Amino acid sequence: MAQALRISETLENAPVKAKASKVQVFYGAKQALTDIDLEIPQNHVTALIGPSGCGKSTFLRCINRMNDIIDGCRVEGDITIDGVNIYGPGQDVVQLRARVGMVFQKPNPFPKSIYENVAYGPRIHGMAANKKQLDDIVIDSLTRAGLIDEVKDRLDAPGTSLSGGQQQRLCIARAIAVKPEMILMDEPCSALDPIATARIEELIDELRNNFTIVIVTHSMQQAARVSQRTAFFHMGVLVETGATEQIFTNPKDTRTQAYITGRIG
Ligand SMILES: Nc1ncnc2c1ncn2[C@@H]1O[C@H](COP(=O)(O)OP(=O)(O)OP(=O)(O)O)[C@@H](O)[C@H]1O
Ligand SMILES: [Mg+2]
C-alpha cells in the first residue's frame, strides 16, 4: 500500500512529457482511433493494453509519426512533446524519430556487425567527432542495454548471430545510442522466452530513469510489472487511464473490468 501511494504521488508530480489531444486516425475511409486524449508522464513507463485490433500500435506510431509512412493513413488532432505539437508546421520528422526511438515486436537488427548496429544512428546524426567518441557511445549504449558482457569480445560478429533476447537488447542499445527522450516499444517481448523477457523487463525499469517509455503489451502481468500508468483501449477509443495499480485492482469502466478479468480480449 505504501508502495502504491508512493507511485501515485510521483505520478501526480511527474511533468507531462507527451500529450495527445483529440487524436483521430484513419486508414482510408476506416477510422481506427477516435478522440484520444492521453498524457504521458516523464520518466515513467506507460502501458497501452487492450484487445487485438483496438488501435494500440496505431496510437504508438502517432507519437513518432511512423504512420506518415503508411499509405492512406491520416492523423488528426495534436500530439505535443514538451509542449510543442509534433504535427505542427516546420517539424523535422527525422529529428523527431531520433528524439522518440522505437523497438518492435520482432528483433530487427541490421544485417551488420553488433558494433555497426549501434554506431549507425550516432554516425548519421553526427554525434561523434572521431572514432574514440563513437566507440564510447557504442560501449555506453551496450552497457545500458545490459548486453556488454555478452558481446564485448565479439563486437564484429553479425547482430543476427545473437539469440533472440540478445538481439532485442541490441535493438534497445541501437535505440538509446542516439540519446532519445522517449522510447516506444510495441510488444517487445512477444518473441522471447520467459528468461529473456524478465531481462528486458528489468531493463525497462532501469531505463525509465533516463527515458520516458511507452510500451504496448498483451500481457497484463507484464503491464502490472513494468508500468506505473496504464491506458486501456477498446475498439478505437481510450476507455480508461490511471495508475497501473488502480486499473488492475479497481477499474472504473465495465469494459476494463471485463478485459482484465479475461472476459473480453
Ligand atoms: N496499415 C493498415 N492499413 C489498414 N488498416 C490498418 C492498418 N494498420 C492497422 N489497421 C487497422 O486499424 C485498427 C487498429 O489496428 P492496430 O494494429 O493499431 O491494433 P492493435 O491494438 O495494435 O492490435 P494487435 O494487438 O493485434 O497488435 C485495426 O482495425 C486494423 O485492422
Ligand atoms: Mg499492435
Image: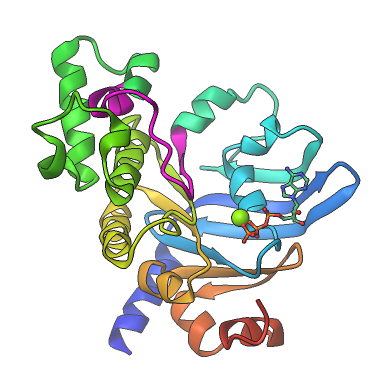
| Residue 41 can be seen, yes or no | no
Residue positioned 62% across, 59% down in the render: 38
Residue 181: give x, y in percent of width and height. Answer: 40, 40
| Residue 137 can be seen, yes or no | yes
The quadrant where ligand 2 appears is bottom right
Extreme residue toward the right, this view: 29
Q: In this view, does 206 lie above or below 175?
A: below
Q: Is residue 100 magenta?
A: yes
Q: Is residue 18 above or below residue 178?
A: below
Apparent side of residue 130 relative to residue 216 in the rendered image (left or right): left
Residue positioned 51% across, 42% down in the render: 82
Residue positioned 15% across, 25% down in the render: 136
Apparent side of residue 120 relative to residue 74 in the rendered image (left or right): left
Q: Does the magenta stretch include residue 108?
A: yes
**Residue range corresponding to the magenta coloring:** 99-119
Q: Nearer the viewer, residue 60 or 109?
A: 109
Q: Which of 156 and 211 is in front in this view?
A: 156
Q: Is residue 58 above or below residue 218?
A: above
Residue 42: give x, y in percent of width and height. Answer: 42, 54
Residue positioned 52% across, 57% down in the render: 40
- Quadrant, the C terminus: bottom right
The structure's colour scheme is: rainbow
Q: In this view, does 60 lie above or below 86?
A: below
- Quadrant, the N terminus: bottom left
Residue 62's quadrant in the figure? top right
Residue 148: give x, y in percent of width and height. Answer: 15, 40
Q: Nearer the viewer, residue 10 or 77?
A: 77
Apparent side of residue 209 relative to residue 233 in the rendered image (left or right): left
Residue 119: give x, y in percent of width and height. Answer: 29, 22
Q: Nearer the viewer, residue 53 or 211?
A: 53
Residue 245's quadrant in the figure? bottom left
